[in-house]
Image: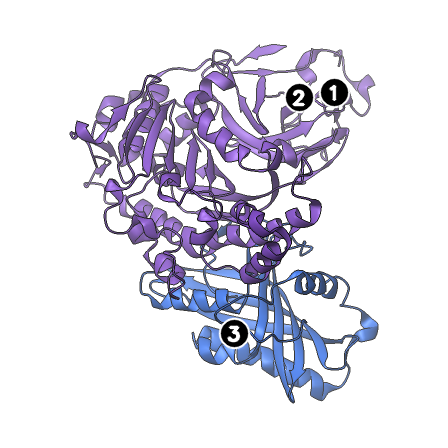
Amino acid sequence: MAPQTKHDPARTSYYVSDALYQELVEGYADWQRDELIVEDPRVCARFHRLLDREARLLDQLKYEEWLTLYAPEFVYWVPSTPNGGDPRREVAVTFDDRRRVEDRVFRFRTGYAWSQAPPSRTVRLIGNVEVFKTAKPTMMMVRSNFFISEFWGETRTLTGWAGHRIVEMDGVWKIVAKQVNLIECDQSLRNPSIIL
Amino acid sequence: MLEKISGSPVPIGTAAHYDWDELVQEDRVHRLIYADPAIFAQEMTHIFGAVWVYLAHESQIPNDNDFLTGKLGLRPLIIVRDSEGKIRALYNRCTHRGTTLCRWEKGNSKSFQCPYHGWSYLNTGRLRGVPWPDGYAVDFRDPKFNLAQVPRVESYRGFIFGTLNSQAPSLTDYLGPIKKPIDEWLDRNPGGKVVVCEANRLKFKGNWKLAYDNSADGYHVIYSHRSLIETENRFNTGYEKGMSFYQNSPDKAAMYVAYTGNGHHYKDKRPNIEKRAGGLWAIESLHPGMEHYAEKLRAKLGDKAEAALDLAGSEPVNINVFPNLSLLGNHIQVIEPVSFEETNAVWYGTKIEDVDGTLGADVVADINALRMRTQEGFPNLGEVDDITNFEQIQRGLACLEDEWIYMNRGLGMPERFRTDEQGVIYGPATDEVFMREYIKEWKRLMMVEPNLVVQREP
């Protein structure tokens, strides 16, 4: 990830740059390699707990607490193709920076976000968690499968896998990128308005 | 070879007994036009068959033998640039037993082989061969064994349309005056062209016309998108962002809606934008990477940066080509009917190319990196609220005894309108005149038995 800049990422977007895109595309290209798997169960458990906590906070609509799991500068990326694609040249289902994620939260709370009025009720199951090392000891990649049961008028499921890029900052592991790969990412989605 | 369709193209013809003048009145339409499967079935011939229907964009099949799968109404198609470069819309249906031939969404292939019994076809639609032909007493050179295909496929500046109607006018005549805003939409981009680059794909449980009704509707903006407008303006940036110009008195503003005939219409918000380089960019809401790339382009291009940034800005028009194509902002939106109560709304993103070398590849790459993000904004934060409202209309229409849907805003107020020498009707931005006019055309089409044909290679 690019070094955190002097600008407030909640107000301005200077960090979504060529360097960040390049690093994302490369970083998400070939990371799930067996020789990089972390075997230490304590390390795996720590990241599994982080993902469980993220799922719970999103289910509970506790967005401020959820955002504390993230670095000040982060990316929330839902590709529109199964291979992830290149967000510089392809529209994604979603490619958000911090400000845009905070836009989403703000929008939910206006009371006029009809797609989320009332808010969906969700239950998320997270499983198959695997932790992968990267070239940097302070950066890990975590793969997990998710199964979201969403109730809005009726119940439906959203499934796929996520790739979290997690960096140690001042002794705390923070998410700097979350790539959400819906199994139906290149198909028409009905009311894709919750945060995955 | 043109092939006449035997028998009635509508198998049951249950919509035949309707009094269309009762269902579509001057000021209102009956709930059945959205809620009756028989009317939907008739639309699949009288509309999605009888008029020029948008099929795909040429940039999706740039090379010989490229194909993608699509639909004409409910008919599965393979839209292909054949081995000689000719664009065809083949029925994705094996002549033998009816199996779809191709299940991939896109690719490059000179031929298609049926996965069921192995009949194979060239991408011209001609039958190439069948397994064990000696077990047949027929001559497989008979054209009837070649794939059916859409008999008339034409492009307008990259947009590929098809019709089954042998008596339809030429595509250019069908488009008529809507070509002017389409041309302007294209010509603001380098070389007057765009390239499709993936899509924001949405669907809703509602009739397809709910999306078309909405496509030039300036009346819903301030309320259906209230959360978006509030969000876009949550920081004081010195400019009213996004669709803020709908606030206060939109009908007194310079923006307008126009009905251009044949069901086409457009809403033009450009007159509300400051006429200067950067005027469009100034109202663009806040998107990922915006400050970085704007600063970078300004450092690189100086005075010319604002015009470049406008290319990443969302063009403030909604250009709607009946029945299924809309150019919205920088998107190519395609309405795909699935059933009388289900519709896909696919928002294809577009990027620009450094066609004439004036911008340079690196500047174009920066503009596109921004343009991808500006395009994701509305489907994520705006359209989801519209499609929720479309679904809730369909739900409301279950009230059988409450039969009518009104589209009478502006009706009976002739001072709101002006008609030019081409017959284009102009009205204020929130007027429903475009809806009344297109639904009249819909009614006319539903009352005429179309002469539909398919073609097979001779």
Above or below residue B277? Residue A112 is below
Q: Are marks 1 and 2 in contact (CB under 8 Å)?
A: yes
Task: Characterize the local packing of mark 1: few (<14), some (14-19) or many (20 or more) Cα atoms within 10 angstroms.
Answer: many
Residue bearing mark 1:
B127
**Amino acid marked by disc 3:** Asp
In this view, the residue in front, B233 or B176, is: B233
Could you tell me which residue is drawn at 25 percent across and 27 percent down?
B24
Residue A13 image offset from top left, x and y in percent: 54, 66
Q: Disc 2 on helix, strand or loop?
A: loop
**In this rendering, position of residue A194 left or right of residue B102:** left
Number of the label disc, if any, that sits on residue B68? none
Q: Classify the position of the C terminus of chain B by image quarter.
A: top right
Distance of mark 1 from mark 3, alpha carbons? 63 Å
Q: Is residue B280 visible?
A: yes
Q: Tell me the mark number nearer the camera, choosing from 2 and 3.
A: 3
Pick the residue in front: B371 or B190: B190
